[in-house]
Image: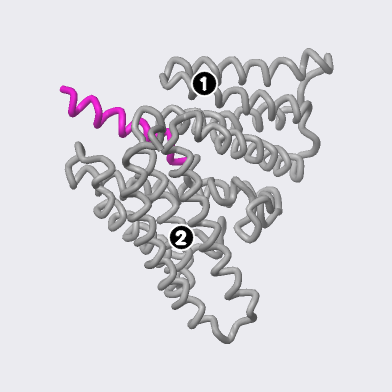
Amino acid sequence: MDNVNPLFFPLLYFLGSATLLSIVLASLLSIMHRDDPDKVKKTIWMKLAILLTLVLILVGTGSLGKWGLLPVVLFLAYWGWRELLQCIEQKYGRVSSSILITGLGILGVLGGLGETLFAIFWSVIIASWAAFALPMLYHLKPPRMHSILGTALGMMLITIPLAILLAMVNTSYGEFSLLVFLVMGNDGFSQGVGLMLGKTPLVPSISPGKTLEGSLGGLFACLVLGYLSQFLVPEWHLWQVLLVSGTVSLLSQCGDLLTSSLKREAGIKDFGHVLLVTGGVLDKFDSLLFTIPIYWFICQCLARFYVN
């Protein structure tokens, strides 16, 4: 227990309170959908259980530092790369040396163990250059364009964010936990409010199921969660916490729309099924992955502000 971050225990209390609120929301949804098949109601509860479990896994392993979070990050990196490359292959054909590219994408994440921007930068650069060049040298022919572009997208969307997340958990567990709560809270409440009140499509050409009401519900939930979890970043002013919370909500929804665009382009419903009814890793963690770099940059700016 000595290795556990002391913030973890108040976080458990906070997570318990959020769980009760989530159960109330899920109960209301079940009542509203009481005439639907039992499968719909079971899906609502399964999604809630998976969401809360993922939050607990992230903040729990994160409380042990970077080495505790490392297995989770490697799991996300493996499945994220696998799902992305399969999505590309679904639309454009075989990706050259996909196993090698996946391995290098995972290795690039390890730069986060260095906890510095320098270590992350060079680990990703080396992994990227190797992923571009080695398939060409092995096959002795020009690599397919979609293989190169898919590799570049994977490094930006998966490897860099996960490397930053690995570094962040050791430098500031409070900032790490706040991000997890905000992104997952936005995800859960935007879906819940969308099912309850959603009538106005947000961007129907990209994701017909997302509504303006759900988006606003996620934004409101982020602001409330940010206000209640200010104890995680006591050095921040309240207006800074709320501004960051609102920004995280908007970035999360952009990340969700981005991956929805990829799925629509590839003609698939989900990236995978490793997380059961919630789909694959990219289905559930798309918002988090998209948000991490900007959130980390904002945290760095705030840290300099308080130092100066």
Q: Position of residue 57 (x, y in %)?
A: 50, 46
Which span of residues is magenta-colored? Answer: 290-308
Task: In the rendered structure, find residue 111 and report the number of the disc placed on it.
Answer: 1
Is 304 one of the magenta-colored residues?
Answer: yes
Question: Dot 1, how many residues are within 10 Å of its Cα: few (below 14), some (14-19), or many (20+)?
Answer: many
Residue 70 appears at what percent x and percent y? 54, 32
Q: Residue at x 32, y 42 (%)?
A: 7
**Residue 214: which quarter of the image?**
bottom left
Q: Relative to residue 55, is residue 34 drawn left or right?
A: right
**Quarter of the image where the N terminus is located:** top left
Percent position (x, y) of residue 6?
32, 39
**Circle 2 residue:** 188
The prevailing secondary structure element of the residues shown in magenta is: helix
User: Disc 1 or 2, which lies upstream in sequence?
Assistant: 1
Q: Tell me the kind of residue under disc 2.
A: Gly
Q: From what the image shows, is residue 162 above or below residue 268?
A: above
Where is 305 relative to 242, above or below? above
How is this picture coloured? Answer: one colour
Report the quarter where the C terminus lies.
top left
Q: Residue visible at 62% across and 38% down?
A: 75
What's the CA distance linking mark 1 and mark 2? 31 Å
The residue depicted at 55 percent of the width and 51 percent of the height is: 284
x then y, percent, for residue 159 = 56, 30
